[in-house]
Amino acid sequence: MALDFELDGLARGAHVLQAGWVAVSYGGIDLFSARSTDVRSLRQLDDQAVIVHGIGEQRARGGAALLDTVDLFLREFAGKIIVAHGASVERDAIARISKAALGLAIPVRTVCTLALERKLKPNLPGGEAYRLAATRERYNLPAHDQHDALADAIAAAELLLAQLSRMSADTRLGAIESH
Amino acid sequence: MNSELASIETFLKTVPPLDRLDGERIAALARKISVRYFRAGQTILEAGSHNEHLFIIRSGAVELRLAGEDLTARMEVGGLFAYPSLLRGGEVRNTTVALEDTLAYLLPAAEFHRLRDGSREVRDFFAENESERLRSAVRDLSQKRSIILEETSIAGLQRHRPPVSCQPDDRIADAAKTMSEHSVSTLAVCENERICGILTDKDLRNRVVAARIDLDTPVSEVMTPDPVLLPETASLSEAMARMTAGGFRHVPVVSAEGDLRSILSATDILAFLGDSTIDTGTKVAKARNREALIAAAQSIPEGFARMESSGFHASHVMRFTSALGEAVHRRAAELAEIEFGPPPCPYALVVFGSLARGEQLVGSDQDNGLILSDDIDEAGEQYFEAFGEWLSDLLHECGFVYCKGGIMAKNAAQRLTLSGWRDRFSQWISEPDEDRILRATIFFDMRVVSGNIELARQLHEDVRQKAKSYSLFLSYLARDAQRTRIPLGIFRNLVLEKSSDGQKVFDAKKQAILPITDIARALSLAEGSPAVGTLERLEWLAETGHMARSDADSLRDAMLFVNELRIAHHAEQLRSGKGPDNAIAPGELSPLERDYLKDSFSVIRDGLESVKRNMAGGIV
């Protein structure tokens, strides 16, 4: 399941404001499974972050309650591996919100397309070249709508398909999973 | 929770024929998509396999090969493929390979069929073969063109402002004097600034002169009272409908407040629609000397551009332009007779090639010759030498520039007696060789434009009878038609050829129109058809059962479609002050036009193939 969170800034305790996800398998991406949801946040939002993701306080207050969101995750993501570009952000955020809501950090398995790209193309200069948009361009993938959680999730899913096309057909999940 | 796939929907809305669907339908479609990625070189679909999806290219490019061999098509972003297999129940005939890394959106077959069932336009787009698609393209073009009539307001084409008017109690004689002074055929009769009637030339004839009415009678007694009025915001088509329905040729146009603005006449509309051709035709026919003829002929390209912008069909533009060309040739010959005195013996001025076929656009060079009576003497030959030179020079000045191949009356080889022409044709027909045929085909399209019709008729009849009985000649003709390499299609900025692609422009005349002309000519001559125009030849062939009706119609559609492109291209060049040519750059074409062009190429290739099969057999 490719997942992307839009966060209120880059700080460690940043709130999740929006989540978008879509199912991806070796066979492709099924857009019927695509979802996105706003997550309620009552706190004063980080101005810089608002500029990036475009989710203002009014919209943030109208989002689903955190507990409902966690509940939804548990149902949608049970037994799935999470795919994201820079998956540690999503892994940390899930641990944080599940701890806040349930008192228990849910452990998740992830495939990080960023880490995978560093493995496939280890010698690119600088960090910029490994960003999602730049990486997609190398695989001839179209420009996508950045800073929308669902669009980013689909973008990461497409990138994973592209990366898999570069790897041998019998590549096992364990070989690309990040730890 | 939200499930909007905004960017995917935005993309789908740019893809024909999905661009015709409403937002709700697009949103529903987006959710049915499965996204796949193919690495460059990877086979996407294999001929002989089974397919359940319509493919839409989101990024990258693919190549389709029929049964895995000949290159048949290349497609890029926004291209749809694999639907022919869905129409066949899933049987894949084209192997499709990713040319570049390709991201594709796949729609399930059931969605594809639902799309087709939903609208005729979508169904037309997904027609199974090229001919059907081309037919709907030509039909769409005619529909698009009639829209121009809907969208053009009559405000732009009124001439007399303010209109010439009189009072209802003015005397008829005074009203007629006003009309004469202002040289108008229609007079508005106004009371307190409001129009209450109109008086036309026709009224003066029918209701005044013919009825012997006293010329001191007030205008109000003979005018047409309370005429139908048009608001100045009315469209051209409304105006035309009003005139047609009422059977009148003049309509007063009023402002929103009811004030008279102008009188719109049928002539104004015709002039706007490019029927300055009729005007130009009159000027050509009445030209008193060479200067007047040159001046009249120079307005032909302008009228051509106007016909294009006002939405005339390709077939009409060709016909009007050819008719004017013919008129210029005829008048030039008449002026030559005035210049040199009456001809010493019967002669005929004949034209060859596109003008003879009635398929001329602007920018063609001259192709003509003189058929002289067999009893001509030396003095007569001298007369026609001067005549021919003067004629060719004048035509050159008129825009029908000198023929590079020398096919013009100023050259002795183009001034032969009837027997001389017969011998020449006879040689082409009975002793053909490749080089001779190459240069002679144009002569087999001939039409007399001036002089003694009988001379030309005899020659044409003779050639027609002879050509059909010489199979070697016919097979040379058929083989000559195969010289042209028909492109496979247009891809990005390339014109695709069978083995090498890399050409930047494609020659719409040489690579599409002339092959169609060749096909029609070869088959017509083989069957002894008297027709000269390509469309008439195709019609004749279908009518007499020598060509399948569907094939003839497909070739006609291809010709009309490519000529639409040429005409638009020429008109654009004329508007930007360039001399017209036939070199169309791929960038000028929309993706849909490229698709239709590809269909045209395919129809032409099939036509050539059948000519080759049926006629080229005589040559080892």
Image (spheres, rainbow, N blue to C red):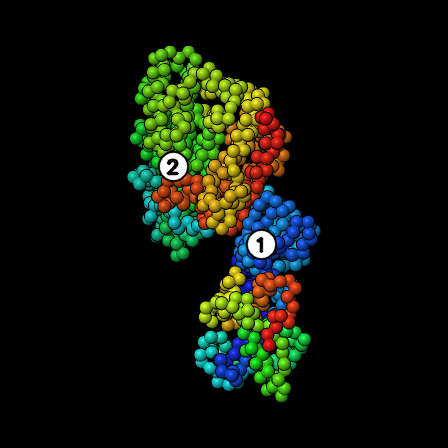
Q: Is B155 or B61 nearer to us in this picture?
A: B61
Q: Residue at x 36, y 46 (%)?
A: B576
Residue type highlighted by circle 2: Ile
Q: Residue at x 54, y 80 (%)?
A: A16
Disc 1 is placed on an element classified as loop
Q: Is residue B82 left or right of residue B178?
A: right
The label on residue B300 is 2
Estimate how packed mark 2 is, as few (under 14), some (14 to 19) or many (20 or more) residues with alpha carbons within 10 Å.
many
Q: Position of residue B184 (x, y in %)?
A: 34, 40
For image coordinates 55% across by 69% down, the residue present is A119
* Mark 2 or 1: the one toward you: 1
Q: Is residue A137 above or below residue A5?
A: above
For residue B41, which quarter of the picture?
A: bottom right
Mark drawn on residue B41: 1
Res A15 visible: yes
Residue B505 place in picture, x, y as percent = 45, 44
Quadrant into which the C terminus of chain B falls: top right
